Amino acid sequence: MISDWHLWSTLTPDTLHDFLRLRSDIFVVEQNCAYSDMDGVDPQCEHLCIRGAEQQLLAYLRLVPPGLKAPQPAIGRLVVAQSARKSGLGRAAMLEGILRCTERYPGQDIFLSGQQHLEAFYASLGFVTFTEPYLEDGIQHVNMLRKA
């Protein structure tokens, strides 16, 4: 596996295409959720891409700076390709995201708006739910925080 962080200014067209397609394949098509994935936040984010031996994108997440989605830095858009599910890549991506957050924003909590069915997964990484479930784009979500 190869994992790389990308700033918007350093993204190649192929990398941008790969992660937008993976996000669309999972969040729009697989989850049958018609919503606008491109929310205008991507240009301010750092993007983690984890690729397999054949350079196929297997997992992705974005690190959102403080003040854009929440007062804290946030991890969002975690996605794992169907072919790589149950491989531990979701956990590996989250651990890299948490590490990057703590390096970039030392001493700050980390915010996460996650799908409710993944609440236990995020809790196993130290995130604590602080809202009641709410409907976002037809899917139940909860807001969670990981203390610094």
Image: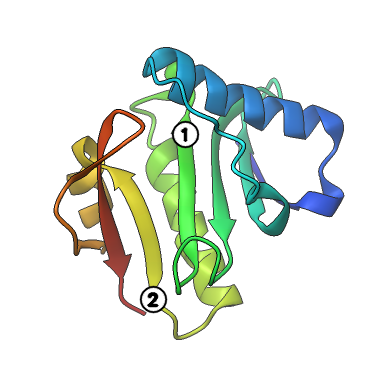
Kindly give the residue lying farthest to the left in the view shown. Answer: 132
| Quarter of the C terminus within the rendering | bottom left
**Could you classify mark 2 by the number of other residues whose Cα lies within 10 Å: few (under 14), some (14-19), or many (20 or more)?**
some
Here the colouring is rainbow
Q: Please tell me which residue lies in front, 24 or 88.
A: 24
Circle 2 sits on which residue?
A: 109
Q: Please tell me which residue lies in front, 33 or 99.
A: 33
Residue 51's label in the rendered image is: none
- Regarding residue 90, the answer to whether it shows in the image is yes
Left or right relative to 125: residue 64 = right
On the image, the x and y values in percent for residue 76 come to: 47, 49
Tell me which amino acid carries mark 1. Val
Residue 49 in the image: above or below residue 95: above
Tell me which amino acid carries mark 2. Asp
Please tell me whether mark 1 sits on a helix, a strand or a loop: strand
Quarter residue 68 falls in: bottom right
Quarter residue 147 falls in: bottom left
Left or right relative to 12: residue 100 = left
On the image, the x and y values in percent for residue 88 come to: 38, 37
Residue 141 in the image: above or below residue 97: above
Left or right relative to 11: residue 22 = left
Q: Please tell me which residue lies in front, 111 or 81.
A: 111
- Regarding residue 124, the answer to whether it shows in the image is no
Residue in the image at 63% along x and 40% along y? 49
Residue 79's label in the rendered image is: 1
N-term mark: 2 or 1: 1
Quarter residue 20 falls in: top right
Residue in the image at 44% along x and 37% along y? 89
Residue in the image at 48% along x and 27% along y? 35
**Could you classify mark 1 by the number of other residues whose Cα lies within 10 Å: few (under 14), some (14-19), or many (20 or more)?**
many
Residue in the image at 62% along x and 36% along y? 38
